[in-house]
Amino acid sequence: MPERQIMRLVVVMLGLAGSLADAAVARAQTYGVDFRNTLMPASGGMAGTSVAAPQDFISAINANPAALTQYEGTHFTLGGGFAEATVNLAQRTPLPLLGVDPFSAKSGTPGAIVPAIGVAQEVSGLPLPTTVGLAVFGAAGGGADYMHVPASNGTSAYLLLLQFAPSVAVELTDRLSIGATMFIGDGYSSGPLLGKSVMTNAYALRGGFGLDYQLGDATWLGAYYQTNQDFRFQNQVVLIPGGQARDVDIGLPQQVGLGIANESLLDGRLLLAADALFLDWRSAALFKSIYVGQWVMQLGTQYRATDRLSLRLGYAYAQNPLNNSFGTSIGPIPVPGGIPSARYVQSQFAVVNEHRMSGGIGIRDLFMPGLDFDAFAGGMFPAAEAVGPFTSVSVASYWIGLGFTWHFDQSMSRAPGRRPTT
């Protein structure tokens, strides 16, 4: 693909991502507040399963960048997801120091549009086969809004983290690849501590590293590690009227992922994949108080019903990450009113659901050769939990999304489940 066309794709990608950067917060399908790959065009239909054999290259950039070498030629994806949650909060006792009275209400946080836009390019002329990628996507989100309830004293918290992610993968041998991604994060936050708060933004870096190995003719193994990413939102909140503005530190945790995928069944038409993830929330600013370390198991399958149509299904189990034994501070900031008040603040990020399911389809050569279409939908099973002795939450949600991918070569991909056109 000519260099000028590649630059045009990058410009278009950045422009579209910028237009989505002010989207509302979403917490629908998150692990803690981390989306992982649950809103990616193809992986979204497999409950985010994507460590060993991602079915879209943006999922490789966001998890195991070594898997980018499974994609030959040039690829451009324009996609995204819409996520919406129903969150109900019940507060059964007054919290005088927070100005909160008993109430029961549904959060007014609207649904959100989360982008997934990227380009991948195989580079020729280097000593080893190399693929580079660039993507912009939603990385995390969470929060709640009870501004419409006078008894809540303006309780509202928002968090949205976007990533601009350049990535590179190198094929060391015919079977072994390594890769790395630099995550340049752009965060938007208000709250979560009650008081006078403003929406502020901050920037932070994160590194990701991965390995991908083809074990035999139909089995792939993958692994990745990502560092923590801490944002400092300056002068975000004033806890006491007339008091000094305080900075709020919020971060994403360091994490590891292991995955396996196999497509030997049904004459190579059935892809089975499984991922195990660990999110070390104890390494994340602010959330080290709210959450504990969290294990996630993702199971996904893809069946190529015809040469053009693929059907996908996925299930994910994620441990409830809520920390039931933290004290009276959120990060370094003490919450006025002791434990009942601290647990009330914690409830604004109480993603207590453990079970998620999703499904999707992939259509190859939708309107023309080289144009693929992916769509997905999923839901998080309803769950409720007491957050401390006087506060309880219930959460249910759904999400949908799609993506269009243009392949600018004849050999579309070597990724499992995707066949060359030659």
Image (cartoon, rainbow, N blue to C red):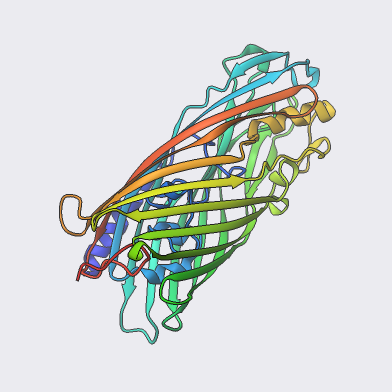
Splitting the image into 4 quarters, where does residue 175 fall?
A: bottom left
Residue extending farthest to the left is: 368
Q: Residue at x 46, y 70 (%)?
A: 219
Figure quadrant of the N terminus? bottom left
Up-down: is 349 above or below 408? above
Residue at the outermost bottom position: 127
Q: Nearer the viewer, residue 243 or 167?
A: 167
**Is residue 241 visible to us here?**
no
Q: Position of residue 407 (x, y in %)?
A: 25, 62
Is 189 placed left or right of 239 in the picture? left
Residue ID at (50%, 61%)? 51
> Does residue 116 lie above or below 74 as drawn?
above
Does residue 348 appear anywhere in the picture?
A: yes
Q: Quadrant of the C terminus?
A: bottom left
Q: Which residue is pictured at 59% across the width and 46% down the height? A: 317
Name of the residue lying farthest toward the front: 266
Q: Nearer the viewer, residue 244 or 17?
A: 17
Residue 213 image point, x, y percent: 49, 74
Asked which quadrant contains residue 204, the reply is bottom right
Residue 242 as seen in the image, left or right of residue 167: right
Whole-percent x, y for residue 67 in the image: 44, 68
List x then y, in percent, for residue 39.
Answer: 44, 46
Count of number-bearing discs: 0
Nearest the viewer among 39 and 233 is: 39
| Residue under the point 52% across and 58% down | 274
**Is 395 drawn above or below residue 2 in the view shown?**
above
